[in-house]
Amino acid sequence: MSSSSFDPSLLDAKAEEAPQTHSTELRGLTSAQVEERISQGKINLNTDLKTKSIKELFIENLCTLFNLINLVLSILVLVTGAFKNLTFLGVVFLNTAIGVVQSVRSKRMVDKLTLLATKRVVAIRDGEEVELDLDQIVLDDLVRLGRGDQIPADAVVVSGDAQVNESLLTGESNLIRKQPGSSLMSGSFIDSGMVFARVIHVGADNYVAKINNEAKYVKKVNSEIMNALNAIVRFASVIMIPLGLALFVSSVHESYIKTGPQDLTVMAWLFSGQAPWHSICDAILTTVGALLGMIPQGLVLLTSSVLAIATIRLARRKVLAQQLYCIETLARVDVLCLDKTGTITSGRMQVEGTYPIAVGEFEGEARHGVPAGVSVLDFALANIAQATSMDANETCKALLDHYRDSGVPIKEPRSVIPFSSAKKWSGASFDEGSFIMGAAQFVLSPHAFALVENRVATLADTCRVLVVACVDGFTDEGDMIGEARPVGFVTIRDEIRSSAAETIRYFCEQGVTLNVISGDDPRTVASIARVVGVPGAGQFVDATTLDTPAKIDAAVDRYHVFGRVTPQQKRELVVALKKRGHTVAMTGDGVNDVLALKEADCSVAMAAGSDAARNVAEIVLVDNDFASMPAVVAEGRRSINNLQRSAALFLTKTLFSMGLAALCIAFPPYPFQPITMTLINFFCIGFPSFVLALEPNNSRVSGSFLINVLKKALPAAAAVVISSIACMAASALLDLDEYQLSTFCLVATCSVGAALIWRISWPFTPLRAAVFVFVVAGIGVGITLFPDFFSIAALTWGQAIVLAAIVAVGCLLFFKLADLCETSLERRTRSATGFGRGVRVKLGRRGKSVSSTGSAFRRAVQTGRARVERNRTQRELKRAQSEALRAVETGHEAAMSAKQVEPGRPALTRSAQQRAASRASSVARASASSMKVEKSSSGITVKMPAKGARHLRGKPRPKKDDKEIS
């Protein structure tokens, strides 16, 4: 059954059919009833996305596009009978085995940490509370759900009251109040309150199982490496088929020209004996050798393996990476949005002090029934905390600890309003009165808040300030009745993590912009941000003043501390940052952070936070320690920087193979055979790439992944192609056979490959030096000790000298091209501040010159777009000016008409009316000529001068008298 065909109203119908149980009879199912439902299969089987099985991982690593291509090529080699040319499959088997092993190790570690990070559900069975795994819930089980819990199965409320966030299922961000008899949809979250609910659906019958995976927070990863690899794979896969076919046909035709009789056609020659078959086999082998070079073998697998190893390393540090590529994304982050509670602070709070306010008549009335030694403020705080203790947040826990042995009498509440992130307050009614506690801006009216604003500002400099007020009562919907009258304040202090300042300093040193976003008072948030060293903490803003998208968009560039932020505003702030081209990471631990976590490029949650935050985040800090973040960044940098070097080796082979294949279509034969490519694949690509990809590397990530790889791969590929052309020319001059030509090209290619490894390994470390020595020694041993196996032909001294010269020229050409490529690409992408990207500024003796680095076509397109935009802007300005002119003329005409009909004045003659109209028209034109029409971010703004004869006659008034019309 599809999600679109499932009607949530069915839950309400099921809720009506469910047996209703009184709140005093919450005994739940008996053991016998549980066993009966288990035998009937009415179990809440887990339908969530899980890690893949070992069988699936094996099939996933085995059945790849690369393995398929290698399988086809190996079948072609088998047809020729040259079995030694199948050695390239060793690299395939090795890469597949590494991928399987790393995937299985990663799976086991992720499964283990996921189990540790998963919260269990509390159920009532035989009248007692028991903790159950989600797949142990049975139909009709009675479960207890509190603030931040995800509803594990469709249920109906039996007892309690809660606000439920169903935005994941319905798209509506408004909280829904749930009371006894209300239905709860699986997949939604408890925002506030606590309920006991009876399960009415289990397993696949749950609503969350009938909707698409988008409700499970699955989002596309923004990975530059993944995008670059996909582009390389698509390019290689598309171009290798036509090149391979053309190369095969060209090789066969060349053999026909050299050995075929003149009186036979090509088809007749193919079936004339054994000689043509040998020619076909040679053409197959050369084509396979060319295609093997075009395949970036192991590049995608290497990437997955490196990131999987990074995941395992992070798992040992109690960091759960739920997606591989999120490690890379976090390493590229340039803006980090921090949630204060749970990230900078530990989430634990303590009461700093209480500050009563004299309230006149109300104080005497509220003291009825309260001991003489207890203030109204203490009575209200202690009793609100006790009344909401079933759903105690950290503020409530701090108040409970503060008043535990204080002697304040605890009364039975008549009604309780739990805290809601939307209302920003909680409250309760007693025989002594009704009280609420929350943020002053949300609790008090503007007039009442103005009376205590200075006091709140003073207290909020270092602590979080909550106001306690008396109200007339509460509605059935949980809203206050009457105007809140303050009775005092309580200050709550957050416990700052000991490692917060050091972690903040690390990100500042890495050039990451830090924004602190919190629902608390901005002054409190700013004071904590200053303590831990957040730059710009002195500039803060109250998000309640950001009531339009334009204000939010403008605040992003100006402030780094945001207080009183709603969940929707958190998301809008992240969106505004992403629109500016930033890579944004978001940390959070609560339900109110879910929208922003989902929108961020990389989201980080605390394991002790809500289920909602953990489910949406790509990275979960299992030990709830923000100090683990630098380790994640370090792993990402190691992975990206090392992969850039290793990818250059793979891409070099792909590029020069394609270039040689295209060249050999016109000038056959292709100089490489599969067995010779195996030597290159292992010593020049496979071994060094895997070893270098795992070494430590904490350098900052800079530039585009694909451009950085091409800067290293293009010079090497060009040097190999030019060296191979030189080898072909030497073959024609020295009359070399195919095996000698293959030997020439093999040695030249391995030499350039060793030069590339030298360059990417500089500066040398012991590990890099060992890798380089092993590569050179391995190539030398393979050529000298196993010539027959690798099809190495013997060379004369003269041929060896020519080969040495080609090798020297090829290596020298590579280093020159590499230097030229790096400097030219670096200069081409450098932008001058104030001029914009792609602008080259030259300063010399003759002065300054500014030119574009883009192509002529690109400049033409940009010029055309700029012209269209300029014309459109001018049309808008002219239209606004003409409308303003009409408005001025209309106003003067109305004034003249009013004067004409003014009682007690004589009627104007016709000539007098004409003179007055002419004078009004002149005044209107003068007015229009002095007004200013500008384009701003909010649209077209027309600034008009104030009324006045002197101003209209050309004597301007001060600017403060100007009026703006938008």
Image: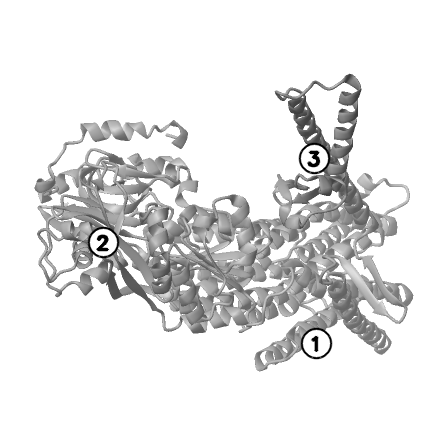
User: What secondary structure is found at the residue carrying circle 1?
Assistant: helix
- Place residue 654 in its image quadrant: bottom right
Q: Quadrant of residue 865?
A: top right
Residue 784's tag is 1
In the picture of the structure, the residue carrying the numbered disc 3 is: 880
**Image location of residue 755, percent across then percent down:** 72, 73
Q: CA distance from mark 2 to mark 1?
A: 99 Å
| Label 3, label 1: how far apart the Cα atoms are | 84 Å
Q: In the image, which is nearer the foreground, mark 2 or mark 3? A: 2
Identify residue type, mark 2: Val
Tell me if residue 146 can be seen. Answer: no
What amino acid is labelled 3 in the image?
A: Ala
x, y percent for residue 781: 66, 76
Residue at the spot of label 2: 359
> Which of disc 1 and disc 2 is earlier in sequence?
2
- Quarter occupied by the N terminus: top left
Secondary-structure class at tag 3: helix
* For discs 2 and 1, the disc positioned in front in the rendered view: 2
Q: Position of residue 235 (x, y in %)?
A: 68, 49
